[in-house]
Amino acid sequence: MTDFRLESLSGVNEDDVWEFQVKPLLTGLPQNVVDIYYYGLTEILNNAIDHSESASADISVELTDAIVKIGIKDFGVGIFDHLRQELSLPDDRQTILELVKGKLTTAPERHSGEGLFFTSRMFDRFSVCSNVCLEQSSGNWLICEEVEPVQGTRVEMELRLPSTRTSRDIFKEYASEENDFEFVKTMIPVHLAQYGDEELISRSQAKRLLHRLDGFKVILLDFLGVQSIGRSFADEVFRVWALKHPNIRIVSVNQNRAIERLIAGKIQG
C-alpha cells in the first residue's frame, strides 16, 4: 500500500494529482480499470477541494493481484453535514437518500451533482463515511448508523480483478446516447427511505422517496430488502405521482410477489 498526503488543497488540480502521483502506481492495469479510477479519483478529490474546507487530504492506493482500492480522506466539513446544512435537509437519513438519487449539489453553478452518483456505481465496493457511513457493495446499499465518526469525509473505491467493467457502461446505463448523454435515469434503493425498522406505509414516506425526482425521465425503484409496502405508499407512488408526471416512467425491480401484486393493482387502477 502507498499512502501520501496533499499538504494543502488550496490551488490543487485534481488532474495533476492523478497524472503524477496516482496513475504511476497503477502501471500494468488494464485501461478500463485505469479509466474508472481516473474518473472516481478526480471527481471525489474535486469535491474535497471545492466543498470540504479541509486544509489537506490523505490518499491511499492498494494494489494486489485480487483488488485495487483507492481511499481519499479529508479533514474538513463532513459531506453529510455539509449537504444537510446547505440544503436544509432534516437529518442524515434524508440527506443520504437525496445523495443517492443524483443531481444533488450545493454549488449548481460549478457542479452538476452527477459525479458521486456515477462514481458510486462504477466500483464493486464504494463507501463514503463521515458521521455515518453509506456503502455500496455489489449493488447492495447499506447505511451504517453506529460507525465511529470520521473527522471530515473518507471515501473508499474498490474493484476486484480481473474486471471487465468500463466507465462507459455506467454512463450508457444512466445517460445514454439516445438521450443525448443527458443524465435522465436514476436508480434508488427503496429501503434507504426507511427509518430503522419502520415499514413503508404512508403517503408522507412516498413523498420523501419521490422528492426531486421530477428532474428525471426514468426512475428505477429497487425494492431489494423491502418485505412489504402499504397501500397508501403504493398508491402515492404508482398512481398519484405517476398521473401527475405522465412523461416520467417509473420501473420497479427486485420486488417480491406481494409488492408486485400491489403495484400492479395501482398501475391498472
Image: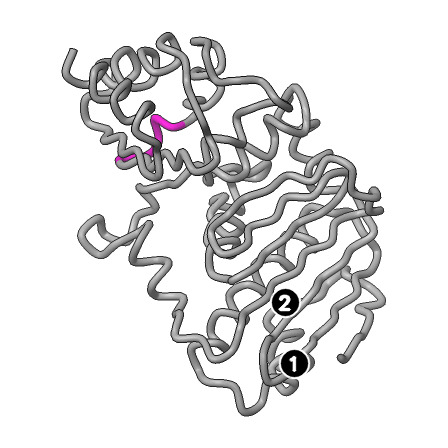
- Would residue 215 be found to the left or right of residue 127 on screen? left
The quadrant of the image that shows the N terminus is bottom right
Q: Position of residue 130 (x, y in %)?
A: 75, 43
What element does badge 2 sit on? helix
Residue extending farthest bottom: 28
Q: Are marks 2 and 1 in contact (CB under 8 Å)?
A: no
- Would residue 59 be found to the left or right of residue 241 on screen? right
State yes or no: residue 214 in magenta: yes
The quadrant of the image that shows the C terminus is top left
- Residue at 45% x, 22% y: name it: 211
State yes or no: residue 202 in magenta: no
Amino acid type assigned to the residue bearing label 1 in the image: Leu
Magenta segment main secondary structure: helix
Q: Position of residue 160 (x, y in %)?
A: 53, 72
Residue extending farthest front: 257
Residue with the mark numbered 2: 14
Instruction: Kindly report which numbered mark, 2 or 1, lies closer to the viewer in this rendering.
Output: 1
Residue with the mark numbered 1: 63
Q: Is residue 15 above or below residue 82?
A: below
Answer with mark 2 or mark 1, whichever residue precedes in sequence.
2
Q: Position of residue 133 (x, y in %)?
A: 69, 43
Amino acid type assigned to the residue bearing label 2 in the image: Glu
What element does badge 1 sit on? strand
